[in-house]
Image (cartoon, rainbow, N blue to C red):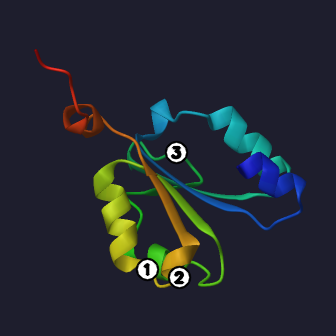
Amino acid sequence: MTEAALAAGRETTLYVAVQDDLDRPFAEQLARFEEQGATIIRYAERNALPGTTPGRLSVADVTNIDRAADTYVCGPEAMIQFVRRYFSGQADKLHFEVFGPSLALEAPTAVS
């Protein structure tokens, strides 16, 4: 989605939160997005490297998202619920996809 937004000339900001900055997935791809004009705001709960905000996404970060922007959130259920609680834009502008192990526990199973 980020590649498509950048190719279309859309202003793009990514908030990327991880537990440990030394194990940040997609670091090279994020750097390429920055080279293409995206704003990348990084967070890490541990080992925050230069250019990374120590800690988690804050209430202020979420409430300050442009109210007119289409906003996409991917991550664990707790993070999605946090963003949904503090998002100040229109509900139809917020799109999300939950990633996490709890999904496997909630999935229907065939039991004989």
Disc 1 to disc 3, C-alpha distance: 22 Å
Question: Disc 3 designates what residue?
Answer: 49
- The residue lying furthest to the front in this view is 112
User: Secondary structure under badge 3?
Assistant: loop
* Label 2 neighbour load within 10 Å: few <14, some 14-19, many 20+: few
Instruction: Please give left or right for residue 19 compared with residue 30 in the image.
Output: left
Total labels: the figure holds 3
Mark linked to residue 1 = none
Nearest the eye: 52 or 13: 13
Q: Identity of the amino acid at label 3?
A: Leu
Look at the numbered discs 1 and 2 and tell me whether their residues touch, using CB distance below 8 Å. yes
Q: Position of residue 80 (x, y in %)?
A: 37, 59
Q: In the picture, residue 32 is in which quadrant?
A: top right
Disc 3 to disc 2, C-alpha distance: 24 Å
User: Earlier along the polypeptide chain: callout 3 or callout 2?
Assistant: 3
Instruction: Identify the residue at image location x=53%, y=82%.
Output: 64
User: Secondary structure under badge 1?
Assistant: helix
Q: Position of residue 42 (x, y in %)?
A: 55, 54
Question: Disc 2 designates what residue?
Answer: 64
Q: Position of residue 75 (x, y in %)?
A: 42, 48
Look at the numbered discs 1 and 3 and tell me whether their residues touch, using CB distance below 8 Å. no
Q: Identity of the amino acid at label 2?
A: Asn
Instruction: Please give left or right for residue 79 compared with residue 41 in the image.
Output: left
Instruction: Identify the residue at image location x=65%, y=76%.
Output: 69
Q: Position of residue 85 (x, y in %)?
A: 33, 75
Question: Disc 1 designates what residue?
Answer: 60
Instruction: Identify the residue at image location x=47%, y=40%.
Output: 21
Instruction: Please give left or right for residue 81 compared with residue 99 in the image.
Output: left
Position of residue 61 relative to residue 30, above or below, is below
Q: Identity of the amino acid at label 1?
A: Ala
